[in-house]
Structure formats: C-alpha cells, structure tokens
Image (cartoon, rainbow, N blue to C red):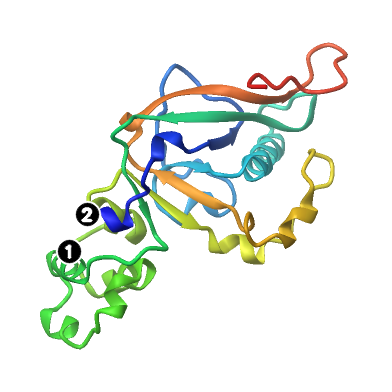
Amino acid sequence: MDNVRVSNPKAMDLFHGSLGIIGDRINIQSGKGVGWNGLTLGDAFYTSLSEDAACLFSHLVLQKSRLMGEEAFDNLGFAKIYKISLNEDFSILDADQALDASRVRSILLRAGVSEVYLNYRHDDQLTEFYKAADLLCYGMDWEGNRNEYLCKALGYDALMVNERAWMNWDYYPSDIGIDWGKLNDPRIWPPKTVAIYNQNMVSGFELYRDGQVYGNEPECPNYSR
C-alpha cells in the first residue's frame, strides 16, 4: 500500500472554501458541496492543494447562498478560505499511482463482481484507480459512491485526485483576486482535490482569508501571513 500513499500528508497545505465552518470540528454532510464537489467523490470534506481553487469554491458557495435567499455578505467576491491541518497518521490515497491488482480483485469480489468476469480483466484495468472503481458497477454487494467505496476499502482516510472536471470548467470570475493566467501552467493546473472521508483525522483548521468586508477596509485580512 505504501507505493500509493502520499508520503507526508501532515506537511501538505490544504485549503477549503465555504461560508464558514460552524463549531470546533469538521463535520461531513451529504450533498452540501457546490459544482462537482457535491457528487464526484462521494460524501467527503472537500479540500484543495490550491488556494485559488478554494477561493473559487468559496465564491460559488456564496453565490449559491444568495440565489437561495440565504446569507449574503458585503464581500470581495468570495466568503472564507480555511487552512486545514491533518493528524500525523492520516493516510491519503494518490489516485495517480498504481494500485495492487490482487488487492483490488479481492475488494471487487467482496463487492459482488463476478469472479468469471474478473478473470477476463487484465491487471492494468485493476491497477488504475478510476478503471478499478468503474468495475464496481458490475457488483451488487456495495453501496454509495464508487470512488469513496474503493478508497475506504483500500484502507485510506482520503483520496487525492487531479480533478478531471477542471479540464472542462468555463467559469473564471475576474473579481475575486485570482490570476487565471496560471491555468496555462501544467505544473499547478488543474489543481489537485483531496476528499477527506474520515473527519476524525483532521486535527484542526484556521481562517486563512476572509472575503467579508468589515467596516471600510479596502482589502480582506489574511490571517496566516
């Protein structure tokens, strides 16, 4: 399993954009995300390696709130961005790395995929995360989101993906402080998403940027710099 695990997740900078985290701990809620984050990777606390991506989602959730007639703030185009801290023993599955084919076969068999069908699947269809997850549609003994199910069955707390939905994204607001010209740099875009399934492995969070305007400040405060 070590070859597909993120080597030092505690040292990662993870960001989350929202209206605001309520309380003193992270609580995963179903269907609360915006954009594809409400569906793609299952019930998770969605974070990103990119501060810009978190800022965009903070902007989206604020717009959604306004459209629903809920909270609306005087702001700089986005709501809040948090920096997330992880426990030392937190485990993240990197979906870009090869899986153990024999282990995946065992999981698929337990999920009800026919052994006869799996005998026709080559190892390269089992070592790629998305291909392996897609094979779950041939089984009946599991439920939920296939990406979440496979990640948890492999024993991980979270899943890191190079979010494919970004490739066809076409909404880039110009008024929230993001330099969208960076999209042309393949080293940082599309940004990686980290979907956290085990909220108990989040050790803490801090407000990193606040888009709400307090009084007449011309710029939002940044609490971590």
Q: Residue at the spot x=25%, y=84% of the render? A: 122
Q: CA distance from mark 2 to mark 1?
A: 7 Å
- x and y percentages locating residue 82 in the rendered image: 57, 28
Residue drawn at (15%, 85%) of the image: 119
Q: Quadrant of the C terminus?
A: top right
Q: Which label was assigned to residue 45? A: none
Q: Amino acid at mark 2?
A: Ala
Quadrant containing the N terminus is bottom left
Binning the other alpha carbons within 10 Å of mark 2 as few (below 14), some (14 to 19) or many (20 upward) gives: some
Q: Earlier in the sequence, mark 2 or mark 1?
A: 1
Q: Residue at x 83, y 23 (%)?
A: 219
Q: Position of residue 14 (x, y in %)?
A: 52, 37
Q: Is residue 215 left or right of residue 146?
A: right
Q: Which residue is more in the foreground, 135 or 128? A: 128
* 39 versus 128 height, above or below: above
Q: Are marks 2 and 1 in contact (CB under 8 Å)?
A: yes
Where is mark 1, residue-wise?
A: 107
Give the residue pinned by disc 2: 153
Q: Is residue 130 above or below residue 8?
A: below
4, 206: nearer the viewer: 4
Disc 1 marks a residue whose amino acid type is Ile
Secondary structure of the residue carrying numbered label 2: helix
